[in-house]
Image: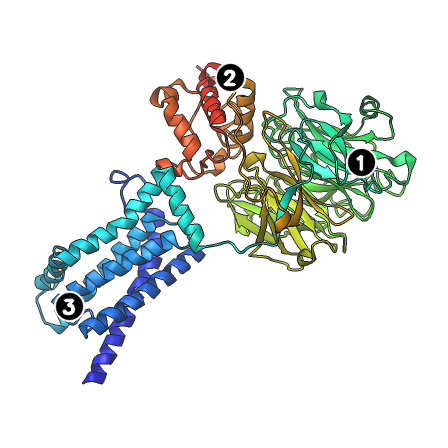
Amino acid sequence: MKQSGYRMQLAVALLQLLFIVVACILGYVLSREVAIIPGAVLRLPDVYVSQSDLWSLAGIFVTVYLGQIILSNVILRSHGFSSLRRFGTEYLFYLFAYTTASLYSFLATTINYDPQLIAAIGLISTVFYLLAMMMVCLVRDRQGVLASIWQPVWSLVRRLLSIPGVLAIGYFLVPLALGMAFTVDRDIANRITQVRIWFNPVPASEWGLKNLYPELVFEQPVLVRQAPGDTAGLYVLERVGRVYRVPFPVATEKELVLDISDQLGEVEMENGALGLAFHPRFADDAGSRFAYLYYTDTRPAEDQVNRLSRFDFAAPDPAARRATETPLMVLQREGSGFHNGGSLGFGPDGYLYVGVGEGVHPRDQEARSSATVLRSAVLRLDVDEQPDNLSPEPFYWGSLQNYRVPADNPFVDHPDIRGEYWALGLRNPFRFSFDPANGDLWLGDVGSTIWEEVNLIEPGKHYQYPMAEGHHPTGRAGPETLDVPEQGPVYAYEHSAYDRAVIGGVVYRGDRYPSLQGKYVFADNYSAKIFVMPADQSRVDDVDLIARASQYAQRGVSSVAQLESGEILVTTLGAASEPSGEVLVLVRAEEADVVQREDTPTAAPADYDEQASAASFAVNCARCHGVTGDGQGPDAPLLGVPMPDLTSPLYHFQRSAEDIHAVIEKGGAALGMSPLMPPWGEFLQPSEIDHLVIYIQSLPDKHHRH
C-alpha cells in the first residue's frame, strides 16, 4: 500500500510540474496579446521577454515548485489532491512557491520582469489546479457536477481566509508592490538594481579604458587614425569638420591640420565629417600625401549632398590643404540627415572602400535603384586611376570623378547594379576595418529599432536590408528585386534602452593584448560598452564585455581603432554643446581611469541656450520624433506605436512642462508608456533636460501647421 501511495504522489507531482510548464508557455502566448492586469487597474509598460528568457523563467518556476511539492508531501504525507482540505492547504504552499519564484526572477536574475507574464502564469496554473481537483471530485469522489465545481473553489476561499492564507496573500503582493515602486521611484529602482547586480556580478575583466590625452578635449571626435608610416602622431577627426594631429603617445597640445567646418552647414542628427582615410603611400611618396574625407553638406537646403573628397596634406598649412580639395563623389541625399554611413578605408589591395548609408539618395522616390544611385552599400574605388580599370558610368544624381572602377569589382557587368558596388543591403555602415592577418572586411551595420549587426563583408553579397535585420525577416520589401546572393550577419544583438547603435571595430592582431588575439573588438555608441567576440566563426551568439567608457548615449563611442604598435584606441563624442570628447586607450584593469568614473555635472548656464537645446533635440530625439518634432522621424513607422506631434498646441495644452520633463528623465516604461522611449536622466544633465523641455514647448510656434 505504501509503495502504491508513493507512486501516486510521484504521478501527481509530475502532473503539477506539467501544469507549471504549460502555464508558463500559455502565459507567454496570452500575455503577448492580452493585458492580464487591465490598464484601468494598473498601468504597466510593455516588456519584451525573449523565448530564451521564457525557458529560463520556466526553469525557475519548475525548480521552486519541485521543492514546494516535496516539502508539502513530506510534511502532510499525502499528495495535493487526496482530499478537499488537503487541496486547500496545497494551494497555500503553491502560493508561497509562486511568489518565491516571482521574487527570485525579479531580484536575482537578468530576465526582463514582465508583470503581465507573471500574472498569466499564476492565473493559468491556478485554473489548472482547480480543474484537476474538480475532475477528482467528479470521477473519484463521485460528486455531482455542481458540487465538483463549487467545493474546490470554496476550499480555496476558506484557506485563504485563514491566518496562513492572509500571510500567503500578503507575501503574494510583495513582488507586485516592488514592481510598482521600481517604475515610479528612482531611489527604490536603484536599490533593486544594486540587489540585482549583487546577485548577478559581471565577471571581472582584465581590461579597462584610460584617457590617452587627459589634458586635451575634442569637439565630437568621430575617428582617430594613424597615417601610414607616421607612428609618432595620431590624426583625430572632429565631427564639426576639423582634423588635428596629436603627438603619440604623450601630448599636451594638438595641431590643426585641416578645417572645413564652414563647408558642412548645420552639424546635427547624423551629419558632419564622418570618415577619414590616408593613402597607403602617404609616408613613402611625396606625391601621395593624400587624405580622403567623407562628409555631409547641408547648406543647399533642397539638395543636400554627401561628399567624398581628397586633400593634399603635403601643402604647408591648413588653409593651403583646404584649397587642395578634389571631389571624387558628390551624392545627393534625402533631407532628414540620417543614415549617411561614413566609414573609409584602404584595403590590402590598395583600393579605397567607402560605406554609404541607405539615406544617401535624392528626394525623387524613383531614383533609388542600384543602377542609378550609390547607397546602402560598401563601394570599392581605384583612386590612383590605373589605366586597366574602368571609367565611372554616367551619373545623374550628383557627380563622380577622379577615380576609376576596379575591373574585378563583382558587379561591373551587372545590368542593374553600378560597378562601384562591392556589397549591398546595408542600412548604415558607419565603421568597418580590415583584418591585418587575412584582409577580411568586418563591418558594424547600425540598425533600426530592434537589431544591430556585425557583418563579415564578402564581394557580390547582399546583406538583406530592409528585408531582414539581425537574423529575422522584417516583412518589408526591398526597393528593387536583384538576383544577388544574400548573406546574414555573424553577430546580431537586440536593442535595450541603451545598447542600440553598434560601432564596428577591429580584429586584434598583436602582442600587447594576448587574450584578445584573433578576436573582434567592437563597441556600442549608446552604452559605451566595449565587446569582444571570436573572429573565426560564421555565427556568434554570445560576446564578452571587457570595458565601458564614461560617456554614454550619443556622447558615447564613435570609433575603435588599432595602431601599428598594437594599442587599441577608442573615441567618445562628448557633448554636442561643448568640446568634451576624448581619445581613450585600452589598458590593464589596474591602469584604467574611466571604467567606473561618473560624468561630472557642469554648472547650469545662466540663460537658456536655444541653439544648444535644438542640437540636443536633433541628436537624441529626431530619429523618432522628427526634425521639427512632428512625429515623422525616419524610425517612427518602425516603432509600432503612434508618435506624438510635439508641434501641436493641443499636445502642450494637455501636458505640463513637468509631464514632459518626467518622460524625458524617466522614460516611457516608468510612466506606463512605450518602453521604446528610453530614460535620459542618467545621460543628460539636469540643466540639459530643463532646456530641452523649454525647446520642445517652443516647437508649436516654430513648426505648427495651422
Furthest residue in direction front, as rendered = 590
Q: Is residue 425 visible?
A: no
The residue at the point 56 percent across, 24 percent down is 615
Label 1: how many residues lie within 10 Å, few (<14), some (14-19) or many (20+)? some
On screen, residue 442 versus residue 112, left or right, reads: right
According to the picture, the residue beneath numbered tag 1 turns out to be: 392
Q: Nearer the viewer, mark 2 or mark 3?
A: 2
According to the picture, the residue beneath numbered tag 3 turns out to be: 86
- Secondary structure of residue under mark 1: loop
**Upstream in the sequence, badge 1 or badge 3?**
3
Mark 3 residue type:
Arg
Distance from Cα at disc 1 to Cα at disc 2: 55 Å
According to the picture, the residue beneath numbered tag 2 turns out to be: 606
Question: Vertical placement of 132 versus 521: above or below?
Answer: below
Q: Is residue 137 visible?
A: yes
Do labels 1 and 3 touch, CB within 8 Å?
no
Residue 304's disc is none
Label 3: how many residues lie within 10 Å, few (<14), some (14-19) or many (20+)? some
- Image quadrant of residue 561? top right
Mark 2 residue type:
Ala
